[in-house]
């Protein structure tokens, strides 16, 4: 058997577990917050709770099954099962990715004082990017040719569609747009000093957006320089870390809503350094 295939299968077997371990560990750490600010918070809408559940539990389920498929101990696999698995993985990635991006768009939009220009730019571009992702994603799935290896007892992906970088390029473009709008929003109004500008960028969650962009940029890089198997498992792992980030953001902001709604009076307090109470929202997602 080709040594490259063997090395790739070993890489997929062990590297795919990284994302799952990170998600389970983060889940354990955030269970109390999840119960308090999501499931026990009457001010969180049912739609928001459904989106949170899909983002967390569907991602964990798909990543866990991915680890199982590439573990070498999966039962009942054949060429058809491998093909079905990739279609389910792709469809789930698009759904969860759309939910994650929608959370970012809506949450950050509200932090930006519901500005019409920002809303229109984000929402229309979001719709265009998601539509493009679905179309190109289906084209990618049709070009993939997964095979079941009886010797390795796992699915083997040897064909990397040429259009794959375009798929991840669309997602990276959307992230760049959001980052650009965050910077523009901070620079739009006259600032008295640099501390206020930095405070505004923190409020817009620029650090969070940059980390999220870096993870999604890894999709694009792997689709260009890696083989099909390496690209697939890097996407799965980065997807897991992207989900952790968006879930952390969701929990943090729902917690802020709970704090606001349970207070008789909610006022933004500014200190001498130009920081507001809202700036602390982003400190948990900084690295």
Image (tube, rainbow, N blue to C red):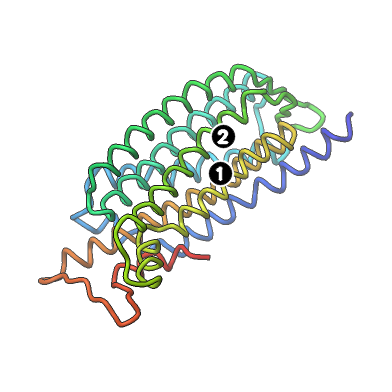
Q: Residue at x 31, y 82 (%)?
A: 272
Q: Which mark is residue 252?
A: none
Q: Residues within 10 Å of mark 1 (few under 14, many from 20)?
A: many
| Percent of width and height locating residue 170 | 51, 33
Residue 2 against residue 59 in the figure, above or below: above
Judge by depth and name the residue closer to the eye, 212 or 195: 195
Judge by depth and name the residue closer to the eye, 86 or 265: 265
First of labels 2, 1 by sequence position:
2
Residue farthest toward the left in the current orientation of the protein: 264
Q: Are marks 2 and 1 in contact (CB under 8 Å)?
A: yes
Secondary structure category for the residue under label 2 = helix
Q: Which mark is residue 216?
A: 1
Q: Which mark is residue 168?
A: 2
- On the picture, is 151 further left or further right than 58? right
Q: Residue at x 54, y 48 (%)?
A: 240
| Percent of width and height locating residue 34 | 35, 59
- On the picture, is 42 further left or further right than 185? left
Alpha-carbon span between mark 2 and mark 1: 7 Å
Q: Residue at x 29, y 72 (%)?
A: 276
| Percent of width and height locating residue 258 | 22, 63
């Amino acid at each position: 058997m080709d040594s490259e295939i063997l090395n790739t299968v070993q890489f997929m077997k062990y590297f795919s577990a990284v994302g799952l371990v990170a998600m389970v560990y983060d889940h354990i750490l955030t269970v109390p917050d999840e119960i308090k600010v999501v499931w026990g918070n009457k001010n969180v809408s049912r739609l928001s709770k459904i989106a949170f559940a899909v983002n967390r539990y569907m991602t964990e389920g798909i990543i866990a099954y991915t680890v199982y498929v590439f573990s070498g101990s999966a039962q009942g696999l054949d060429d058809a099962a491998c093909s079905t698995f990739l279609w389910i993985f792709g469809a789930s990635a698009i759904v969860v990715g759309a939910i994650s991006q929608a959370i970012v768009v809506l949450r950050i939009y509200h932090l930006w004082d519901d500005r019409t220009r920002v809303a229109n730019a984000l929402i229309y571009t979001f719709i265009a990017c998601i539509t493009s992702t679905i179309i190109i994603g289906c084209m990618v799935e049709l070009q993939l040719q997964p095979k079941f290896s009886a010797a390795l007892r796992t699915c083997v992906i040897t064909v990397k569609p040429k259009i794959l970088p375009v798929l991840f390029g669309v997602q990276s473009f959307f992230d760049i747009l959001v980052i650009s709008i965050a910077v523009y929003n901070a620079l739009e109004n006259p600032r008295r000093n640099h501390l206020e500008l930095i405070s505004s960028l923190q409020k817009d969650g620029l650090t969070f957006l940059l980390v999220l962009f870096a993870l999604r940029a890894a999709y694009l890089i792997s689709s260009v320089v890696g083989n099909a198997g390496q690209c697939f498992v890097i996407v799965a792992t980065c997807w897991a870390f992207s989900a952790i980030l968006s879930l952390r953001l969701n929990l943090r902001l729902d917690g802020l809503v709970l704090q606001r709604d349970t207070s008789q009076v909610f006022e933004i307090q500014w200190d001498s350094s130009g920081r507001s109470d809202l700036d602390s929202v982003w400190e948990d997602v900084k690295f």
